[in-house]
Amino acid sequence: MSEPSGLIQIAQAARLLMISEERIRQLQKQGYIPRLDKRGVVPLVGAVQGYLRYLKDDERRTAKSAADSRVRDARALEIELRIAERSRDLIPLEDALSDMAELAALVRAELAGLPARLTRILDERQKIETEIDGVLARLSERAAQKAQSLGVYPETAGLPGPRNPALTPYMLPWSAAVHRGNYRRVVAVTAAQSGKTDSMLDVIGARLDQRPAPILYVGPTKEFLTDQFEPRLMALLDDAATLSNKVVRGRRMKKTLKSVAGVRVRLAHAGSSSALKSDPAALALIDEYDEM
């Protein structure tokens, strides 16, 4: 005997919704599927709509539960970090980086004064200085390798994948000299599109990662900063595994001012005297000087 129009047997509804008959009855008790006076049947439209409503509610409950779980995990982690900091098992990242930079500067100063303390013979001093320079050069090469691992070109680039400084070998001595820090001024004279800006990004990434200190980058125009250099700098900071978590984001991040592990990176241009003198810098990089 056929059911009145719009009604179907519970067994048919179960097959239609791909659930059990018992599940249909549970959804009726929960108020999702209408219950009728006539036993064994349910309204077709009411059953489908009720089941869809149940699925949406279940999805919201699952999402809320997952969000609550993430909040609990975050609170637990925060408590663990506070305990570790109070017990001195954990120290602020800024303190650690500052201590490392101070130690590196001390080692460099001690090495610089070593030849004069060892001998008064000029030939001997020169030999010792040569050996020290060799040690610093090898450290600089290691820094260049580290900088290479920090940069990754996107799929849209001409050569996507990890940054390879060897593609512009003529810029390697300049990068090494800047990173070594033995000179007050290092100049590179190149043609256009020679990879000098990428080399500057290598130096910035390596310095922020290994010896963090305030950096000032100066470009020829404001448009160059905001349209060309700043997106490439952010790509470096986002792609570098050792830097991405150190970047201060949100309202404190500006187009011309970045903060990485508490260290400021200021982007300025030749037409802004206030930006050029607003922040102290341990490293200043001037790009496209002939265009200023």
Image (cartoon, rainbow, N blue to C red):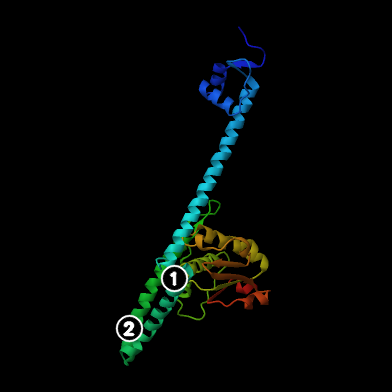
Q: Quadrant of the C terminus?
A: bottom right
Give 11 or 233, whichever is nearer the viewer. Answer: 11
| Residue at horizontal 39 percent and vertical 74 percent from the top | 137
Instruction: Tell me whether circle 2 and circle 1 mark residues in contact (CB < 8 Å).
Output: no
Residue 70 in percent (x, y) is at 51, 49
How many marks the image carries: the answer is 2
3D distance between C-alphas at marks 2 and 1: 32 Å
Q: Quadrant of residue 134?
A: bottom left
Q: Amino acid at mark 1?
A: Ala
Query: Could you say whether the residue bearing mark 2 is in a helix, strand or loop?
Result: helix
Residue 36 in percent (x, y) is at 63, 19
Residue 282 to residue 205: above or below = below
Q: Is residue 161 visible?
A: no
Circle 2 packing at 10 Å, graded few (<14), some (14-19), many (20+), is: some
Give 205 or 241, whichever is nearer the viewer. Answer: 241
Residue 42 in percent (x, y) is at 61, 19
Q: Amino acid at mark 2?
A: Ile
| Rendered image: mark on residue 128 | 2
Q: Is residue 96 visible?
A: yes
Give 121 or 283, whichever is nearer the viewer. Answer: 283
| Residue at horizontal 46 percent and vertical 72 percent from the top | 95
Query: Could you say whether the residue bearing mark 1 is in a helix, strand or loop?
Result: helix
| Residue at horizontal 34 percent and vertical 86 percent from the top | 115
* Extreme residue toward the top, this view: 1
Residue 172 in percent (x, y) is at 46, 69
Circle 1 packing at 10 Å, graded few (<14), some (14-19), many (20+), is: few
* Extreme residue toward the right, this view: 271
| Rendered image: mark on residue 96 | 1
Tell me the mark number nearer the camera, choosing from 2 and 1. Answer: 1
Q: Is residue 228 left or right of residue 207?
A: right
Residue 130 to residue 150: above or below = below
Give 163 or 47, whichever is nearer the viewer. Answer: 47
